Amino acid sequence: MSLAPVAILAGGLGTRLGALGRSTPKALLPVAGRPFALWQLELLRDHGAERVVMCVGHQGDEVEARIGAPFGLDVRYAHDPPGLAGTAGALRGALALLGERFLVLYGDTYLRIDYAAVDRAAASERGLMTVLRNEGRWDKSNTIVFPVPVDFFSGIQKMLGGQPAPTAPRT
């Protein structure tokens, strides 16, 4: 059984990487001799992925040219409009390539998890989204924890539908 299509959010500017991020998209940074995105795509293939949509922005043409569609995967590219679209905008721009149900990964994340189990769990639930809980197992340097207001999920739904979402308070 194959996984639901996978969206990889690989359009960020890489500002925390300084000069390296300005000159090379994170997806193309070398790790153990090859671009990071290739490691991520190979991992997804090994877990049953068939279709992956790379949501690219910053130097997206270079990512598409260098990564292509390796490992027998159907890799498609959704380019942000001028002026980066952000997470929800990137996903909104890729919906036609993804379909109604899909998995989302950050382009700088390599998680050794059972993607098929996550996909099955998400398919068995009726909800807007399923989120894999970190529970302190992986790096959380890019995590902000805030109280989830009742309208949080409807806000995400509005963002995907093109309407602005309310800003969640941060603590």
Image: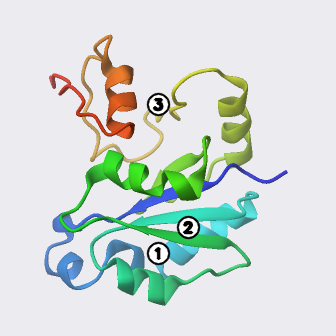
Q: Cα distance, mark 1 to mark 2?
A: 7 Å
- Tell me which amino acid carries mark 3: Glu
Numbered badge on residue 36? 1
The one of 148 and 60 positioned closer to us in this rendering: 60
- Tell me which amino acid carries mark 1: Phe
With respect to residue 22, does 85 lie above or below?
A: above
Q: Do callouts 3 and 1 mark residues in contact (Cβ within 8 Å)?
A: no
Q: Do callouts 1 and 2 mark residues in contact (Cβ within 8 Å)?
A: yes
Image position, residue 46 (x, y; %): 74, 64
- Tell me which amino acid carries mark 2: Gln
Residue at (60% x, 63% y) in the render:
52
What crowding class fits label 3: few (fewer than 14 Cα within 10 Å), some (14-19), or many (20 or more)?
A: few
Q: Cα distance, mark 3 to mark 2?
A: 22 Å
Image position, residue 135 (x, y; %): 46, 31
Residue at the extreme top of the image, as rendered:
150
- Specify the quadrant that holds the C terminus: top left
Q: Is residue 117 visible?
A: yes
Q: Is residue 31 visible?
A: no
Numbered badge on residue 40? 2
Secondary structure beneath label 1: helix
- Residue bearing the label numbered 3: 135
Secondary structure beneath label 2: helix
Secondary structure beneath label 3: loop
Q: Would residue 20 be found to the left or right of residue 74 on screen?
A: left
